[in-house]
Image: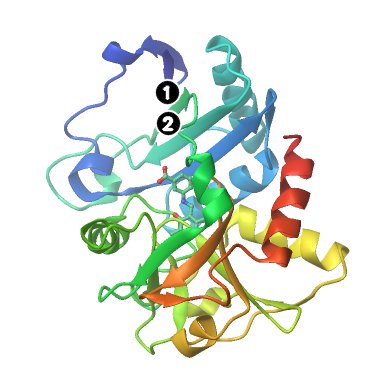
């Protein structure tokens, strides 16, 4: 495996950054999780746009153009001879000193790792996931915008640990008002009477690339879509619930906090939208 670090490729063992990098010292940086299907990077421009928006929002200058970033992403796939892959793109504040001051970091660090994907086992798509709601609430947008895909994932990791302890692979996080925000690394959707709902970004959701794609696919297929605040009551009484994300794609949910959703099987619309998504990515 060859890893891209600041314009050069290193073997996995030799791909290293400084212990003074503020990405490590403070979680000061941004990242993207991207997928390639059959050699084509899925929604490459959208991921690059989100990365640069995240960077701009935290006063971080990415030391290359968006066009150069696209070239670097494709080159990293090429060097590793990967067709179906998971790409982790990380931009940190760079090497600085032992203080918060980002002005001490003259140049951002850019890392691109491309690996074969660890897929969710097929059985989860057939049977559906069981999830719980966590006590850990999503960080409020007035503290750190969830729109920024930053290297500060502790909030989500605390939620993930609650899920692991309950035997669940994914968890639902509420915002401080008690409305549904999203999951630890996925967005959430529900269906009711044929209409598709997902929480608004203001509720504390990341603007997921898969979320956008599924909303577009659904509208194109004639579903009515809405983005209202959703409560746990809405999810518990939904006809269908599913998750979207780069890793999960479209994943049915059949149990929430011990309550069986509808008949406990992946729903018709979920299967339909999953099929449309898989067609779009060519699988
Ligand atoms: N919410 C959060 C908090 C996320 O981190 C999503 C929603 C879904 O967004 P996309 O753009 O992927 O549809 C994410 C995505 C990983 C990993 O390795 C995490 C994500 C994506 C890919 C890999 O844990 N998070």
Question: Disc 1 versus disc 2: distance between alpha carbons?
Answer: 5 Å
In this view, 231 is above or below 207: below
Label 1 or label 2, whichever comes before in sequence order: 1
User: Quick one: SS at disc 2?
Assistant: strand
Q: Which residue is mark 1?
A: 6
- Which quadrant holds the C terminus? top right
The foreground one among 96 and 261 is 261
| Residue at figure coordinates x 67%, y 38% from the top left | 42
| Residue at figure coordinates x 52%, y 12% from the top left | 80
Describe residue 278's horizontal placement relative to residue 156 as left or right.
Answer: right
The foreground one among 234 and 59 is 234
Task: Give the residue furthest to the front.
Answer: 263
Task: Give the residue furthest to the left.
Answer: 98
| Residue at figure coordinates x 49%, y 54% from the top left | 54
The foreground one among 205 and 171 is 171
Residue 69 image point, x, y percent: 59, 31
One can see residue 190 in this view: yes
Q: Which residue is mark 2?
A: 110
User: Quick one: SS at disc 1?
Assistant: loop
Residue 60 image point, x, y percent: 42, 49
Describe residue 70's horizontal placement relative to residue 136 as left or right.
Answer: right
Residue 84 image point, x, y percent: 60, 25
């Amino acid at each position: 495996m060859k890893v891209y670090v600041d314009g050069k490729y290193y073997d996995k063992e030799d791909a290293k950054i400084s212990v003074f990098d503020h990405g490590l010292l403070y979680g000061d940086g941004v990242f993207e999780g991207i997928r390639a299907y059959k050699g084509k990077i899925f929604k490459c421009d959208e991921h690059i746009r989100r990365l640069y928006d995240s960077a701009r929002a935290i006063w971080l200058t990415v030391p290359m153009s968006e066009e150069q970033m696209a070239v670097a992403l494709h080159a990293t796939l090429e060097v590793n001879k990967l067709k179906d892959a998971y790409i982790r793109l990380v931009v940190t504040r760079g090497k600085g000193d032992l203080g918060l001051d980002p002005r001490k970091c003259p140049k951002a660090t850019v890392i691109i790792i491309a690996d074969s994907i660890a897929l969710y086992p097929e059985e989860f798509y057939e049977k559906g996931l069981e999830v719980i709601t966590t006590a850990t609430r999503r960080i409020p947008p007035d503290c750190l915008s969830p729109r920024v895909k930053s290297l500060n994932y502790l909030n989500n990791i605390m939620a993930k640990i609650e899920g692991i302890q309950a035997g669940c692979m994914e968890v639902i996080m509420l915002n401080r008002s008690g409305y549904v925000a999203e999951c630890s690394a996925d967005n959430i959707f529900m269906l009711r009477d044929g209409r598709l709902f997902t929480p608004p970004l203001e509720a504390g959701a990341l603007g997921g690339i898969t979320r956008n794609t599924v909303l577009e696919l659904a509208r194109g297929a004639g579903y009515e879509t809405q983005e209202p605040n959703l409560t746990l009551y809405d999810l518990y009484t939904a006809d269908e619930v599913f998750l979207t994300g780069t890793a999960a794609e479209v994943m049915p949910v059949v149990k929430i906090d011990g309550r069986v959703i509808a008949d406990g099987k992946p729903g018709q619309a979920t299967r339909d939208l999953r099929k449309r998504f898989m067609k779009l990515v060519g699988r």
